[in-house]
Amino acid sequence: MKTLAEVLQDWEAVIGLEIHTELTTLETKMFCDCKLSHGDAPNTHVCPVCLGLPGALPVPNQQAIEAIVMAGLACNCDIQRRSQFYRKHYFYPDMAKNYQITQGPVAICMHGHLDLEIPTDAAAERSLDARAYVLPVRIQRIHMEEDAAKMVHVGGEEGRISLASESLIDYNRCGTPLIELVTEPDLRTPAEARLFMEKLRQIFLTLGISDCSLESGSMRCDGNVSLRRRGSSELGVKCEMKNLNSFKALHDALAYEICRQAEQLEQGLPVVQETRHWEPSQHCTVTMRVKETNDDYRFFPDPDLAPLDLSDEFIEHCRLRIPELPDTKIARYCASWGLRHREANMLAADPIWTHFFEQAAQGQSPQTVQQLAKVLLNDVAGWFKATGHSLDDGSLTPEQLVELCHLLDSHQLASNHISALLDLLVQQDGQLEELLDQAGLRQISDTAALQKIVAAVLARSSDQQRQYQMGNTKVLGYLVGQCMKESHGSGNPKLFKELLVRALGTLGAPVGTSSAE
Ligand code: ADP
Ligand code: ZN
Ligand code: MG
């Protein structure tokens, strides 16, 4: 198979996403007052409505409607004053009523858009010389529906139904409020699709309407993709991909599928419209089922639910509940503190990080805030990754981050000792300053003390001295390393370098070009 870059020279990929998000932060289900449960014993939050017992009547959850209106406003959609719930029928044990309540041709949120910033590294997927660009992505709609029950297939491959010996079912999830966002086919590369999903996740997290976990399935994405010859404006036949439960899976499945369709088309074979399943272990997609149409679903308005009428006051109430959105936040971080877009974007990605960072940054100079961002996103984030700690487990407070930066700034702490200091901080509480001394991590910036070490190192490095004087300044790095070793890692490397340069400079004129060597 050709590579993605080769394929995209001749073909243009057309991608549209369908993104389901469970409103996990609500208290109750969509059409009944069963509690939304996470990890409770199976089938303990059920009632006649969500089990679909005869005669039970659904009542829409107002908080869920508020959440979807907020989502719609944040995605620049037109909020429809009147919409209708529909029944989508299918026969499968995960939905006891044998139909799912969803919405008809008019969804609560219609015709939105998001502007997607594509940084240079992601832009390269369009073409190698592409620079960063902004891609407007139209959103067809966001509609309200209910989730199905959770099924667990036991004894099969990778937990799938094929070859399973038995299937277990948990109706706790059944009836969970779910919003589905459908984009227009405006995306052109897997990198763009991934960035769209990331941006939407940032927005929904900021709105506080979901925990947006791809891993646990509270946010799920289906990727639709087709190909057309470069220069053509007709749409090709698409395939829909399921099981994209990480950003990497979304990217890799689309990339694979684009290459598979290109191979098919280049051999003169048609692309069959179907739903395919991404197999991460085999790194390919396989046919799941051929596409159903709306006729197959016997799609019609739910007679149990009156049309939904939203007042201007209600929509205004939702608008007022929207907090500062990531784009505004990023622009503010860049303008008021001089952060780079990439850093600001990472900090705005998750409300927990945003809150922590803003607390630390409060009242600090732009220069200090830049350092706070750098230390948090590089050193501290690296330490989290290595140790399994996280920002919300309280292992580091915003005040401690400020103190950490102060220690770095005043050359009392070397950046390569940050993780050792953090290790100590979680083992025993205390002032960072005290822990620094206790662990012997305080950086020595006392010139006289360092000077002694420099002299000792130079005394046993006559070879390197000679090389330096012949113009090989690379040995300086080696000599700094020796000094660091001699000081057991506690010397200030910048000072060592200065002292070494000074000492080597006064050791006599360079030997010059000696042919004797
Ligand atoms: P369906 O009728 O199969 O449900 P829709 O028109 O509702 O298709 O679109 C579903 C998703 O597929 C949307 O995200 C849309 O942008 C995308 N899509 C539609 N047509 C194409 C195509 N030819 N190629 C790629 N994506 C497409
Ligand atoms: Zn219920
Ligand atoms: Mg559709």
Image: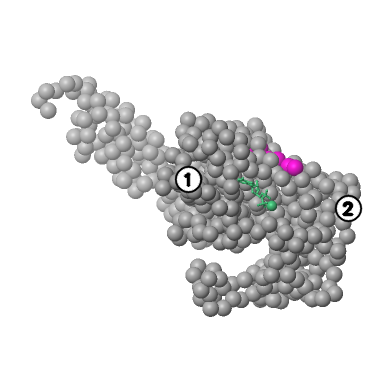
Above or below — where is 152 with respect to 30?
below
Residue 115 on the magenta segment: yes
Residue 186 on the magenta segment: no
Q: Judge the density around disc 1: few (<14), some (14-19), many (≥20) Cα neighbours within 10 Å.
A: few
Tell me how the rendering is colored: one colour
Q: What x and y, as percent, mark residue 100?
A: 74, 64
Q: Which of 337 and 344 is in front in this view?
A: 344
Q: Judge the density around disc 2: few (<14), some (14-19), many (≥20) Cα neighbours within 10 Å.
A: few
Give the side of residue 19 with respect to residue 244, left or right: right
Q: How many labels does the image show?
A: 2
Amino acid identity at mark 2: Asp
Q: What x and y, as percent, mark residue 68?
A: 76, 52
Disc 1 versus disc 2: nearer the observer: 1
Q: What x and y, as percent, mark residue 3?
A: 43, 44
The region drawn magenta spans: 111-116
Amino acid identity at mark 1: Gly
Judging by the rendered image, the residue that carries numbered circle 2 is 309
Residue found farthest to the front: 268
Q: Which residue is drawn at 75% across and 71% down?
A: 97
Q: What numbered label is drawn on residue 245? A: none
Sequence-first tag of 1 and 2: 1
Q: Which residue is drawn at 56% across and 78% down?
A: 166
Judging by the rendered image, the residue that carries numbered circle 1 is 268
Q: Which of 508 and 45 is in front in this view?
A: 45
Q: Residue at x 42, y 52 (%)?
A: 440
* Mark 1 within 8 Å of ligand 1, using the beta carbon: no
Above or below — where is 287 with respect to 510?
below
